[in-house]
Image: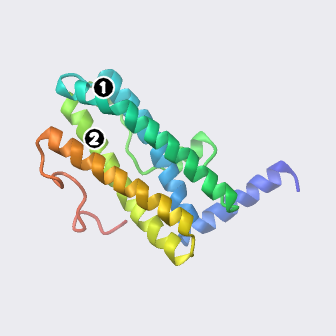
Amino acid sequence: MTSAERYEQELKQSDIDHHTPTAGAMTGHIIANLLIHSLKISQAKLFAQGPAALFLAQTGDKWIEYEQAEFAKLNRLLVNSGESIPTTTDQYKQFTMLEEDGVTKYQQGDDQLFALVKDFDTQTLFITKAIALAQKEKWPELANNLTDLLAWIKGQIALTQRFLGHDLRTGLYTEDDDDDF
C-alpha cells in the first residue's frame, strides 16, 4: 500500500471514529484543543495588559509547558495503540473546538484571561467524554492520563476565576447552555 493510500485509509477510519465516537477520536479533539490553547496562551502573554499580564507572566509558561507535555503524551498513547492523531494544520483546525479571533489580542487583559478560562472549560467537556469512552473501551492508561489532565485543568480554572474575582462557574458552561454537545 502506498503512503497516499495509507493516509486515505486513515482519513476514512478517522471519519468513522468521529461519528461513533471512540475514545481515540475524542482524544484527537483534546490534542487539537491543547495545541490551539497553547498558542492562545502565548498570544495572551504577549498582548494582555494590566494585572492579567502579571498573572500570565507567572502562570502562562507553566500552562504552555503542561499542555505541550500532555499533547506529546496523548499523541504517544494513541499512536502506541494504533490510533490516528491529527498531524496536519487542517486537521488541528477541523478537530479543535476552541474559537480563535485576532481581535482578542486587543481586548482588556482580564477579558483575554477569561477567554483562556472558557477554553479550559470547553476542554473539560471533551476530556470528560473521552474518559467515559476510555473506561468503556477498557483503555485504563488513557482514562488515567485524561483524569489527571482534567484535575489539572479544573485547578487552573479555579485559580484563574479567583484571580478574576469570579465565582467558580461564573460565565462557564452549564448543562442548560447547550444540549448539542
Disc 1 is placed on an element classified as: helix
Is there any visible trace of residue 85 in the rendered image? no
Residue 22 at x, y percent in the picture? 55, 69
Instruction: Say above or below: 12 vs 98.
Output: below
* Badge 2 amino acid: Ala
Instruction: Say above or below: 158 vs 116.
Output: below
Residue 16 at x, y percent in the picture? 62, 68
Which of these two is toward me, 121 or 65? 65
Numbered tag placed on residue 115 in the rendering: 2
Which of these two is toward me, 72 or 115? 72
Disc 2 is placed on an element classified as: helix
Please name the residue shown 36% across and 35% down the image: 101
Q: Residue furthest bottom?
A: 136
- 90 sits left or right of 8 in the view: left
Residue occupied by mark 1: 57
Please name the residue shown 33% across and 48% down the image: 120
Instruction: Say above or below: 77 vs 129.
Output: above
Quarter of the rendering occupied by the C terminus? bottom left
Point out the frontmost of discs 1 and 2.
1
Please name the residue shown 56% across and 49% down the image: 73
- 12 sits left or right of 148 in the view: right
